[in-house]
Amino acid sequence: MSQANTDTQTRNPRGRFVKGHSGNPGGRPAIATEVRDLARQHGPHAIRRLVELSRSADGPVAVSACKALLDRGYGRPEQGITLSPGPNIPVGAIPPEEAAQVYAQLMAADPTTDLSGVHFLPTSAHPGAAEGR
């Protein structure tokens, strides 16, 4: 059976898998399960060793061991994202008067600021425009 014929049977016109068909019909390879199970057998020893290392006089070693223990016990911390205005501002995102104020503030803060790289994009080019953001 050709690849194209197989794809039309397992995927719908939008390219998604048809109900009951998988992109990985063989499932996970058995070797991955075996390796995972083998590694888990050494888990208690590894945790004990990390506890020992967390008491090390070598600061970086102790910190690394403590981080590993905390990550495994409580999960890795969430990553925060700080958003700040970028150089591309969609037209219509802010009123023209406000844009003029922002420009004036930037120039007042540092008259040598190079704003040649600042571009106003049409609203349709803004990534969130279609969603109303």
Image (spheres, rainbow, N blue to C red):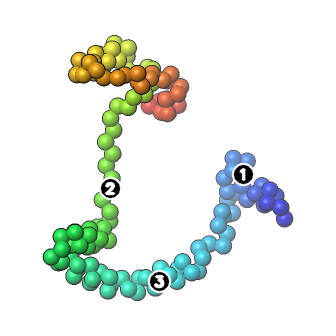
* Label pair 1/3, CB-CB below 8 angstroms: no
For label 2, the residue is 78
Q: Is residue 130 visible?
A: yes
- Residue at 52 percent of width and 27 percent of height: 125
Furthest toward the front, the residue is 112
Q: Amino acid at mark 3?
A: Asp
Q: Amino acid at mark 1?
A: Asn
State the mark number for residue 12. Answer: 1
Q: Amino acid at mark 2?
A: Glu
Q: Secondary structure at mark 2?
A: loop
For label 3, the residue is 37
- Residue at 66 percent of width and 64 percent of height: 22
- State the separation of the CA atoms marked 3 and 2: 28 Å
- Residue at 35 percent of width and 23 percent of height: 114
Crowding at dot 3, Cα within 10 Å, few <14 / some 14-19 / many 20+, comes out as few
Query: Looking at the picture, how far across and down is residue 66, in whole percent?
Result: 23, 71
Q: Image check: 62 left or right of 119?
A: left
Q: Secondary structure at mark 1?
A: loop
Viewer-closest of 86 and 16 = 86
Crowding at dot 1, Cα within 10 Å, few <14 / some 14-19 / many 20+, comes out as few
Query: Looking at the picture, how far across and down is residue 85, in whole percent?
Result: 35, 31
Query: Looking at the picture, how far across and down is residue 19, in whole percent?
Result: 67, 59
Query: Looking at the picture, how far across and down is residue 123, in whole percent?
Result: 49, 24
- State the separation of the CA atoms marked 1 and 2: 36 Å
In which quadrant of the rendered image does the N terminus lie? bottom right
User: Tag count in the figure?
Assistant: 3
- Residue at 26 percent of width and 69 percent of height: 64
Q: Quadrant of residue 57?
A: bottom left
* Label pair 3/2, CB-CB below 8 angstroms: no
Q: Is residue 53 above or below residue 130?
A: below
Crowding at dot 2, Cα within 10 Å, few <14 / some 14-19 / many 20+, comes out as few
